[in-house]
Image (tube, rainbow, N blue to C red):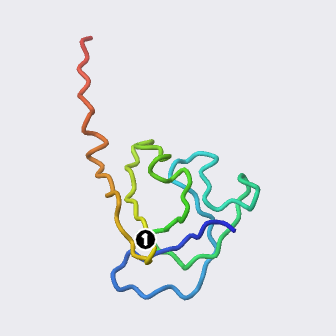
Amino acid sequence: PPPPLVCVSAAPGAPAATEPRSYIAVGHCCESGDLVTPAPDQPEVLQPRELAAAAVGDICVVEGAGAYCSSMSTKNYNSFPEAAEVMVDAAGEPHLVRQRQPLEQIWQNELPFKSTA
C-alpha cells in the first residue's frame, strides 16, 4: 500500500473535515518525478488519493517521505527552505527533531556583486 497522507488543518480549533476529496499530491520541486501519489508499481502515472478536504495553509503530512526526508532533501533547491521534521515514538507521541529553516538562512552566505566594469 502507498504511504499514508494526512491533511491537517492549520486553522486553530477548526473542525475536522468530514467529506473526503480526491487529490493528486506533488512536491515543491517542479520536476517530472516530484510525485507523491503515483500509481502502484507505476512511478510516472498519476493516481488520485482520497484525503480530508484541504484549505489553503493546511499541512499535508507524508509518512515515509523518501526523497523528502532530511538526508535526501534538495536543500535550498529553488530557494525552498528545509521543512520541519517530526518523529513519532513508540507511544505515538510526536517530537520535533528539526525546526523549519528560516528563509534568511538561505541568504546568509550571499555577498553583494560588485562589478568592476
Q: Which residue is mark 1?
A: 89
Query: Could you tell me which residue is drawn at 54 percent across and 88 percent down?
Result: 18
The residue under label 1 is which amino acid type? Asp
Q: Residue furthest right?
A: 41
Rendered location of residue 15, percent (x, y) = 43, 88
Dot 1 falls on a residue whose secondary structure is loop
Q: Residues within 10 Å of mark 1 (few under 14, many from 20)?
A: few
Up-down: is 23 above or below 83? below
Nearest the eye: 19 or 96: 96
Viewed as shown, does residue 69 lie left or right of 97?
right
Q: Residue furthest front?
A: 90
Rendered location of residue 69, percent (x, y) = 48, 53
- Residue 105 lies in what quarter of the image? top left
Viewed as shown, does residue 85 lie left or right of 30?
left
Rendered location of residue 26, percent (x, y) = 58, 58
Up-down: is 19 above or below 41? below
- Residue 64 lies in what quarter of the image? bottom right
Viewed as shown, does residue 33 lie left or right of 14?
right
Query: Could you tell me which residue is drawn at 60 percent across and 82 percent down?
Result: 20
- Residue 88 lies in what quarter of the image? bottom left
Nearest the eye: 64 or 83: 64
